[in-house]
Amino acid sequence: SVFNPDENWIVEIRIVSAGQHYDAYYMKMDLNLVGKKQDIVTEFQKLPEFVEPYTMTYDIKTKLVLVTWKHGTIFTDTMMIYINPYTGKLHNEASLLKTPFGWFVQSVQALFDESTRQILFLIQQSDLQQIQITVWAITVEFDTMKIIEKKQVNALAGLQTWTFFKTEKKSNS
């Protein structure tokens, strides 16, 4: 879910089991209606083709949400798409990472650096027996969904080149 503190709303994607498959729903809640109305949900709609959302990154400047999600059931890819939080409309779908056959995505984390307009995605994949694990560090430009860098990392040392993790050293003079 994402929260806009200026306008006091929350946008969520909820997954509902529908027998042997899952349906994804976009929902917007206006927190200004709490205590005034019984239902604070102002937008609600089914999202086509969503299997499972991983992350939602909201940019308050552009008023866009960049969502990563699982596409497919056998051959699963991690996809990116923009959602307009005011209308729930989807646009500009792009592939972020393919998952090899017999593997699955264990976790996806997203860190947004507003100053560089980049998102660092940390994606952990594993084989079905969870014997082999790979971790990907993927840097994406928020405004274009362009992949800037994609590499496998074995330790935190592999992430130190990203701007978010750099710290300035202060001189004692």
Image: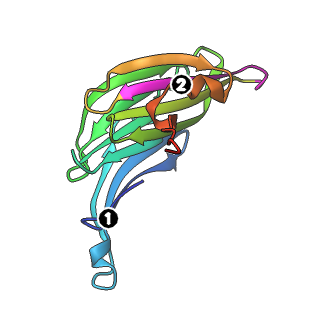
Say left or right for 126 vs 22: right
| Residue ranking furthest to the bottom | 35
Q: Left of 45 or right of it: where is 125?
A: right
| Residue denoted by label 2 | 137
Q: Measured along the vertical axis of the image, is residue 152 above or below residue 5?
A: above
Residue drawn at 54 percent across, 16 percent down = 151
Are the residues at dot 2 and dot 1 in contact (C-beta closer than 8 Å)?
no
> Residue 109, how many percent across, how many down?
53, 38
Residue 132 shown in magenta: yes
Task: Residue type at mark 1: give it.
Answer: Pro
Q: How crowded is mark 1: few (under 14 residues within 10 Å), some or many (20 or more)?
A: few
Q: Which residue is drawn at 28% across and 77% down?
A: 33
Numbered tag placed on residue 5 in the rendering: 1
Span highlighted in magenta in the image? 129-140
Q: Is mark 1 on a helix, strand or loop?
A: loop
As drawn, the label of residue 77 is none
Q: Is residue 9 above or below residue 141?
A: below
In the rendered image, residue 13, in percent from the top left (x then y), is placed at 40, 50
Where in the figure is residue 88, as x and y percent of width and height? 25, 48
User: In percent of the image, x 53 and y 45: which residue is there?
Assistant: 172
Q: Nearer the viewer, residue 145 or 129?
A: 145
Q: Distance between the residues labelled 2 and 1?
A: 29 Å
Q: In which quarter of the image is residue 134?
A: top right
Residue 81: give x, y in percent of width and height.
32, 33
Q: Is residue 150 above or below residue 38?
A: above
Pick the residue in front: 94 or 123: 123
